[in-house]
């Protein structure tokens, strides 16, 4: 599959703007490790489990949470990472795997 080269700025990449038509027909699977404050773990898990396209696969009492995220575009991946990182009680979010077709 040949794609047209699109010049993106650093700001475009960080904000998740991938350019017109670039995300059409794509399916993104992303693996994340979310680190939450242990005392807020239950609250964070509740919010994560309610997010569409997100599955929680494991958690530890120390606040580590393993999740997968399925989205239709790169923009949605970046937006969801930002949303998760801003949740009360979340200390960090690490992207550990990303695949798209």
Image (tube, helix red, strand yellow):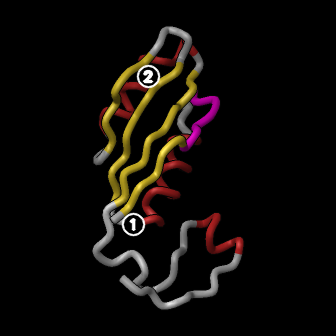
Q: Do the numbered discs 1 and 2 sit on residues whose CB atoms are within 8 Å?
A: no
Determine the image quadrant of residue 14: bottom right
SS at circle 1: loop
Whether residue 93 is in magenta: the answer is yes
Where does residue 53 sit, x and y in percent of width and height?
Answer: 29, 47
Vertical position of residue 66 compared to residue 100: above or below: above
Numbered badge on residue 43: 2
Q: Quadrant of the N terminus?
A: bottom left
Residue at the right extreme of this rendering: 10
Residue at the image position 44 percent from the left and 41 percent from the top: 31
Check disc 1: other Cα within 10 Å, few if <14, some if 14-19, many if 20+. many
Q: Tell me which label, 1 or 2, sits earlier in the chain.
A: 2
Q: In terms of depth relative to the viewer, which is nearer, 88 or 58?
A: 58
Q: Is residue 80 above or below residue 26?
A: above
Which residue is at 37% across, 40% downward? 68
- Where is 87 relative to 70, above or below? above
Residue located 33% across and 42% down the image: 54
Residue 20: where, in percent of width, then height?
45, 86
User: Residue 73 bears which disc, if any?
Assistant: 1
Q: Residue furthest front?
A: 1
The magenta segment is: 89-95
Q: CA distance from mark 1 to mark 2?
A: 27 Å
Q: Is residue 19 left or right of residue 57?
A: right
Locate the C terminus by quadrant: bottom left
The answer to whether residue 55 is magenta is no
């Amino acid at each position: 599959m040949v794609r047209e080269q699109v010049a993106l700025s650093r700001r475009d990449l960080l904000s998740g703007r991938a350019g017109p038509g670039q995300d059409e027909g794509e399916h993104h699977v992303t693996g994340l490790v979310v680190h939450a404050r242990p005392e807020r773990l239950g609250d964070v898990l509740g919010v994560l489990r309610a997010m569409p396209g997100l599955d929680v696969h494991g958690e530890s009492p120390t606040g580590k949470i393993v999740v997968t995220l399925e989205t239709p575009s790169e923009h949605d991946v970046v937006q969801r990472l930002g949303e998760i990182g801003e949740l009360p009680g979340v200390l960090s979010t690490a992207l550990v795997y990303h695949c798209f077709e």
